[in-house]
Image: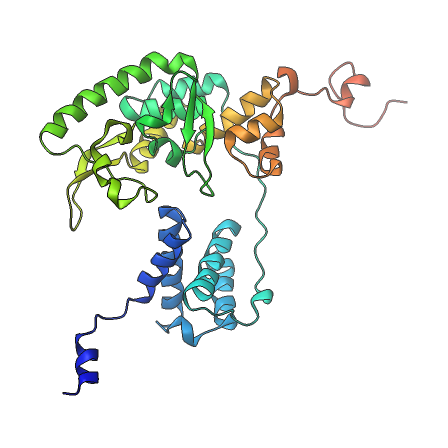
Amino acid sequence: MSEENRAKATAPPAPRLLDRLRDAIRTKRYSPRTTEAYVSWVRRFILFHGKRHPDTMGGGEVKAFVTYLAVSRRVAPTTQNQALAAILFLYRHVLSRDIEKVTDLIRAKPQTRVPVVLSPEEVSRVLQYLRGLPRLAATLMYASGLRLSECLQLRVQDVDFERSEIVVRGGKGQKDRRALLPPVLDATLRAHLAMLQEQHQAQSKEGFGEVFLPDTVNWRQAHEATEWRWQWVFPASRLHVPAEGAMRRHHLHETAVQRAFTLAVLRSRIGKNATCHTLRHSFATHLLDAGYDIRTVQQLLGHRNVSTTMIYAHPARRGGALPISPLESIAPGPARTGRPQS
């Protein structure tokens, strides 16, 4: 066997396409959720075209797939745009190609809907049917306007009791921001963290005190995985066993809170299709009801553009009362229908 053939035989196999895609996305510092969503859409794109390699396809195949999603599958506009963004990312950052007719790929216009909002009384009724970590997480989401993922990814060092604030790190768009931490939650949250610290100390002595660290932490700081400040505020009950390395603890899974919240909504009989994200909608709307300006609410929610926050201005009441309809000025009594009497 020649030296060239021997080198080819001993060379490590080239990374698979989806692995290359994951590496490219992580290089851009996208969130783990976005990473898996992009990989999933690229996989579906390949399967839709009979497992053809994307390098053998172009704009026509991309447009056919996006059209299929919109017409046959009737996916939401945001879902359609995410699928298109994933495929374009593959071509531009992995295959180094600007596929032809990209300008012809029409992005779906997102539908603007008035968000579901709970009244303070309805929030209280739902919280009464929650227990344990789901109750504390839901309370914190409503108190601070956090997304579910932001809430569950909080670490001990992100809770600042002295400044009455929470530091949200790597939120949507990989942006950090400061959120409210109302003093009314101090006692409950301090007691919760004190209990977690006792458990962490006991588990550390047994060799099970490590947690997963964010990608931004240098590998040389791996010893910090056992430090108290990096521990989750909402830890999972079980340890995660990776393919290699020490067992580490992840944060509570989102589905655990979502299922508990859905059940609490049903039991409360509020008659609304509320989800965990409804607590964030309610937080923003109630702040506007209380007279806070929209720029303040925008910063607390972490919205890039104030136009995104404006969606909460529709159901919000200025000064705590709904505007008075012009009809009130001409119809002192109930509105009447029919022909005017002669």
Q: Is residue 315 visible?
A: no
Nearer to the camera, 296 or 127: 296
Occupied quadrant, residue 270: top left
Q: Position of residue 211 (x, y in %)?
A: 23, 36
The quarter in which the C terminus is drawn is top right
- For image coordinates 38% across by 17% down, the residue present is 161
Q: Position of residue 178 (x, y in %)?
A: 46, 28
Q: Position of residue 65 (x, y in %)?
A: 47, 65
Left or right: where 306 falls relative to 21? right
Nearer to the camera, 19 or 11: 11
Left or right: where 4 falls relative to 258? left
Occupied quadrant, residue 123: top left
- For image coordinates 47% across by 64% down, the residue present is 92
Left or right: where 124 falls relative to 260? right
The quarter in which the N terminus is drawn is bottom left
Nearer to the camera, 123 or 53: 53
Which color scheme does this rendered protein use? Answer: rainbow
Q: Is residue 209 visible?
A: yes
How many marks on residues? 0
Residue most extreme to the left: 206
Q: Is residue 212 above or below residue 330?
A: below
- For image coordinates 15% across by 46% down, the residue present is 245
Occupied quadrant, residue 309: top right
Residue most extreme to the right: 342
Q: Position of residue 254 (x, y in %)?
A: 32, 36
- For image coordinates 61% across by 28% down, the residue present is 295
